[in-house]
Image (spheres, grey):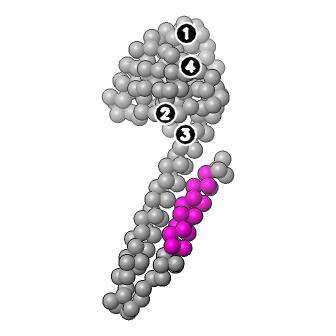
Amino acid sequence: MGIDLYMLTGDNEATAKAIAEQTGIKHYKAEVLPQHKADFVKELQSKGKLVAMVGDGINDSTALATADVSIAMGKGSDIAMDVAKMTIISSDLTKIPQAIRLSKQTVATIKQNLFWAFIYNVIGIPLAAGILYPVNGFLLNPMIACAAMALSSVSVVSNSLRLKWKK
């Protein structure tokens, strides 16, 4: 996904190293205090990086609040879930890439809906206002204008419902 991964943990060096080796994480820091986690996030941001922070405890809450994107794990502390912008209901870390993909698809769908709603309004409103009346005497029947507005809403909702079937 083109993501640089860092593990910051309050655990000791031996535990952090073992977990990093098991999971294939190249960059890790052990025995990190909560404020140092937030400082590390700020340091990455100052280098122009977009920072996503995943955490589950009180010790992560400051860094979660500082990060551009913050993800709390569902079985973590309440404060971590309150501060985070996204909460994964389970504590399954393998759900994070799926959540990122769903987020990108959601933003794309919002942009599509805005585009089509804009096009509809650019065409539909002048027609309903009678822009063609001076040219050829055409006036849009209000019933047809209402039906077109309803169809516009149906198309936006239908496009959004496509997210249900994305994997």
Amino acid marked by disc 1: Asp
Check disc 2 and report the residue beneath it: 85
Q: Secondary structure at mark 2?
A: loop
Instruction: Residue 120: give x, y in percent of width and height.
Output: 45, 69
Check disc 1 and report the residue beneath it: 11
Q: Quadrant of the N terminus?
A: top right
Residue at 53%, 49% (x, y): give it: 106
Of the two numbered discs 4 and 1 in the rendering, the one whose residue sits closer to the viewer: 4
Inter-mark Cα distance, 3 to 1: 27 Å
Amino acid marked by disc 2: Lys
Q: Which mark is first along the chain, 2 or 4?
A: 4
Label count reads 4
Q: Which mark is first along the chain, 3 or 2?
A: 2
Q: Which residues are magenta?
A: 146-163
Check disc 4 and report the residue beneath it: 77
Viewer-closest of 50 and 159: 159
Which label was assigned to residue 72?
none
Residue at 50%, 26% (x, y): give it: 82
Q: Secondary structure at mark 4?
A: loop
Inter-mark Cα distance, 4 to 3: 22 Å
Amino acid marked by disc 4: Ser
Q: Which mark is first along the chain, 1 or 4?
A: 1
